[in-house]
Amino acid sequence: MLRRRLSSLLLRSPCSSAVASSCHHQQHHLLLPTHAEKPPAPNLLRLFTSLAGSDGDRPFIAFVLGGPGSGKGTQCSRIASDFGFSHVSAGDLLRNEISSGTDHGEWILEIIREGRIVPSEITVELVRKAIESSSAKRVLIDGFPRCEENRIAFEKITGTEPDLVLFFDCPEDEMVKRLLSRNQGRVDDNIETIKKRLKVFESLNLPVVEYYSSRGKAHKINATGTEDEIFEAVRKLFSTLRL
Ligand SMILES: Nc1ncnc2c1ncn2[C@@H]1O[C@H](COP(=O)(O)OP(=O)(O)OP(=O)(O)O)[C@@H](O)[C@H]1O
Ligand SMILES: O=c1ccn([C@@H]2O[C@H](COP(=O)(O)O)[C@@H](O)[C@H]2O)c(=O)[nH]1
Ligand SMILES: [Mg+2]
């Protein structure tokens, strides 16, 4: 059913048809952290800093989205090395917070273990800092935004939108198979968490893809087949870009 829904949303690449975006996170609020879980609010003034001033100064930004195990990280590494992009993985930034023992590391670990979404005030700030400190002209943001609230916060705080959104479309059974054999010691690579992540993907991540489809920015890539086959489709798309 999910595949059918996605295909109807993203028949063309890029999508030119308007697709209504909807915010499902209210009805799925139980999947998000509760108020009690929130860490101390960061300094809001510091958060409201645009990315490197005017739009003309900022790097080319591509959001890379797709279900858990769809191959975002794998393909991002290849795009980065062939097309000179800096690779910013939101998940890696959060895992660094855990491994470096920051104040809210344990709290982030629990959220990841449960397959839920870390609040925007944490993630947007990590992503914004990573973009700024990379000083790259082309940046891939892997696995972010994860929900409409993330997207709106990013656009508001950085004062910018992505130039391109790549969406890796992969069947659920293939994603599950890949995650269960990933073997990288991730706390979320177990069937209980994977099931939760798939629900979050459908209810919260997909509306972001729908939103960018309606803006003509989303490009769907068939994420089945070998890594090489998928990268060939990616390469074709990136070769057409004026970077
Ligand atoms: N085309 C492919 N065929 C088979 N296995 C693949 C393919 N692409 C990636 N993999 C493997 O599947 C696993 C998941 O890939 P990857 O980590 O890139 O996915 P992801 O979308 O970043 O997942 P997550 O959202 O959990 O970070 C990895 O072990 C990777 O080596
Ligand atoms: O923007 C984000 C990105 C990630 N998370 C949490 O981390 C895990 C793993 O993320 P990957 O990108 O797949 O490595 C994800 O399931 C979320 O729990 C997040 O909250 N916000
Ligand atoms: Mg990944």
Image (cartoon, rainbow, N blue to C red):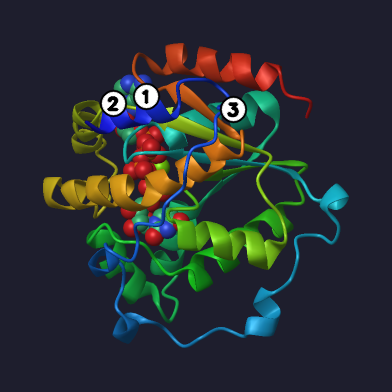
Q: On the rendered structure, is 121 left or right of 8?
A: right
Cβ–Cβ under 8 Å for marks 2 and 1: yes
Task: Give percent across and percent down for residue 150.
Answer: 50, 61
Identified at 25% across, 64% down, the residue is 31
Q: Which residue is mark 3?
A: 16
Residue 113 figure quarter: bottom left
Q: Which mark is residue 4?
A: 2
CA distance separating discs 3 and 2? 18 Å
Q: Quadrant of the C terminus?
A: top right
Q: Residues within 10 Å of mark 2 (few under 14, many from 20)?
A: few
- Check disc 2 and give the amino acid type: Arg
Cβ–Cβ under 8 Å for marks 3 and 2: no
Q: Which mark is residue 7?
A: 1
Identified at 47% across, 33% down, the residue is 167
CA distance separating discs 1 and 3? 14 Å
Q: Earlier in the sequence, mark 3 or mark 2?
A: 2
Q: Quadrant of the N terminus?
A: top left
Label 2 CB less than 8 angstroms from ligand 1: no
